[in-house]
Amino acid sequence: MHFKTKICGVNALADARSAIESGVDAIGLNFYAPSRRSVTREQAAEITGNIDPGSVLFIGVFVNMPVAEVVETVAQVGLDAVQFHGDETVDMVDSVGRPVIRAIRVGDPESTEREIRQWADHGVAGVLLDADAGHDYGGTGKTIDWEKASRLTCQVPLILAGGLTPTNVARAIAEVTPDTVDVASGVEGETGRKETDLMREFILNARRAFDRLT
């Protein structure tokens, strides 16, 4: 599973279509009910069911949901991968039947690297670096310390999130050299509503920055 750009927190079919037309590789569907970007299974299935198969990856974002419910959601919605953002344990990696991405909050380098190694050793498909936002689980617009992130050793594909925007994504890619960039609030006009122009600009700037790394 390889992708360069992901737009997370999509909760409307029109936004999903605009994201795909903008050239995004993956779309994140958030199943964490307290989030202002969350979707129900039924809403998510309406989105995935009206998109041509294979045109984009759909990744479900979960926070402390029981494994059985995750598996049911994967089947009902037709998810390509699962992203854990809560207090999930490594033994859940083999239980959901899909590639797993683990979100990790960037703290001190030693503990962050230890957590990355732990999840990499248990077969995650990738690690997503996000800002430490206290009791919030992503989508806060807080930016992580790119210099600190650039010094981390990651044995699996690295996804950079946290405060990315069309304006700063190229610099973030140049400094951190991630495999993928992930955006939510940075392409919104109001919370939960994606702006087509911002998505298009973000993806274009990200692609150009990735091209400069090769």
Image (spheres, helix red, strand yellow):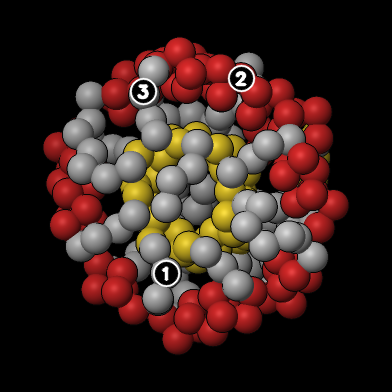
Is residue 172 in view from this perspective?
A: no
Q: Residues within 10 Å of mark 2 (few under 14, many from 20)?
A: many
Image quadrant of residue 7? Answer: top right
Where residue 23 appears, x then y in whole percent?
A: 68, 37
**Image check: 187 left or right of 102?**
right
* Point 48% across, 29% down: residue: 143
Q: How many marks?
A: 3
| Of pointers 2 and 1, the one earlier in the residue sequence | 1
| Of pointers 3 and 1, the one earlier in the residue sequence | 1
| Of pointers 2 and 3, the one earlier in the residue sequence | 3
In the picture of the structure, the residue carrying the numbered disc 1 is 98
**Image check: 56 left or right of 116?**
right
Tell me which amino acid carries mark 2: Asn
In the picture of the structure, the residue carrying the numbered disc 2 is 205
Label 3: which secondary element: helix
What numbered label is drawn on residue 149? none
Where residue 79 appears, x then y in whole percent?
A: 56, 68
Label 2: which secondary element: helix
What numbered label is drawn on residue 176? 3
Tell me which amino acid carries mark 1: Arg
